[in-house]
Image: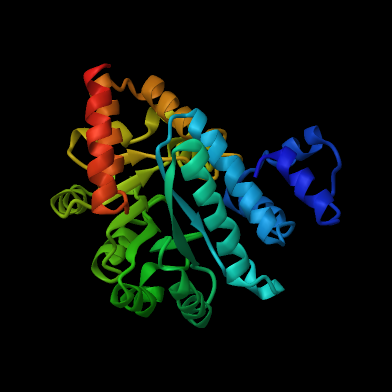
Amino acid sequence: MEPEQLLFFAERNKIPLPFDTVEQAKSAYAFQGYQSFIDAYIRNTLILKTEEDFYDLAVAYFKRAQEDGVIYAEISFDFQTYTPRGIRPAVLISGLNAALKYADKEFNIKGNLILNIIRNKNEESAFQALEQALPFRETIVAIGLASYEIGNPPSKFARIFQRAGEYGFFKTAHAGEVLNFSQNIREALDILKVDRIDHGVQVINYPDLLNECIEKKIGFTVCPLSNVCLGIYSSLNEHPLKRMLDQGALVSINSDDPAFFGGYIADNYNAAYEALGLHQDDIIAIAQNSLESSFASPTLKKEHKKRFEDFIKNV
């Protein structure tokens, strides 16, 4: 949610904010560390109430994504932030699904949804969210695990992810973003049986674990600008993306809360390209990895692979 959108939704839903200009709103996006980011994120979610809100927010994202050349997107969201204040899951899904259809028609972008389980919530809340996802299997293709790693290991949600697997969902989890939390990657692999790791950059410090992920073709959705904004790395020059790629990891570049972390998908590609000395072949490999590790249908993957190969021939 960009600062301009924050003011728009607040006015539409008659919800007061501690500021009333775009410049003031922008200053509120300048956070220090993870907790201040979460505080800002939660503040923004509190002004979303209606199906129209979720539709407008998602369409605005897809419009921006089209400008960066996106042709397929997986959008992460959650129920647990909204249902405690009376917003029904169907309200979110109706808005998001309508936006997916609009993006397909108007922007030629296909998309799917990933329902995140919020790791600082309890297991009962997580089971409820999972059950609420079942009527919407057409577009919710995966279950994720999100929010702060420390104190909330993947093993806390072992039964949730087992059930998600039984229901046929793909599985992914934020793990190994924070220093010295390689154990969370281990638990995500061994206990949650994930298909993909979100972030996972600390794996570079554990060669055996990295090699296992490479052998199992576990994808890593790396978000370079987010990692720097949260202070995980002091600059992009320190980022392990290039080293992970060179060692054969199925690593892709992604945008994490782009309005907060200073960049949409092309910004992340460009910043990594400049800071890490990536070559054209690296960019091609990263883009191919994003397709391979996606949760798109086999038919769509085949279609996009052909489209991508045709594009590369003319580069």
Q: In which quarter of the image is residue 90?
A: bottom right
Which quarter of the rendered picture does the C terminus lie within? top left
Say if 136 sits above or below 57 in the image. Answer: below
Quadrant where the image shows the N terminus: top right
Q: Where is residue 293 in the image (x, y as percent from the top left)?
A: 27, 48
Q: Farthest residue in the left direction?
A: 215
Q: Can residue 213 be seen in this view?
A: yes
**Of residues 231 and 147, which is closer to you in this image?**
147
Above or below — where is 126 with respect to 294? below
Q: In which quarter of the image is residue 46?
A: bottom right
Q: Is residue 293 above or below residue 283?
A: below
Q: Residue 200, percent across and down?
A: 34, 50
Q: Is residue 82 left or right of residue 234?
A: right
| Front in this rendered view, residue 251 or 187 | 251
Q: Which residue is drawn at 27% across and 20% down?
A: 280
Answer left or right for 111 relative to 77: left
Please tell me which residue is depicted at 27% across the width and 31% down the height of the picture.
308
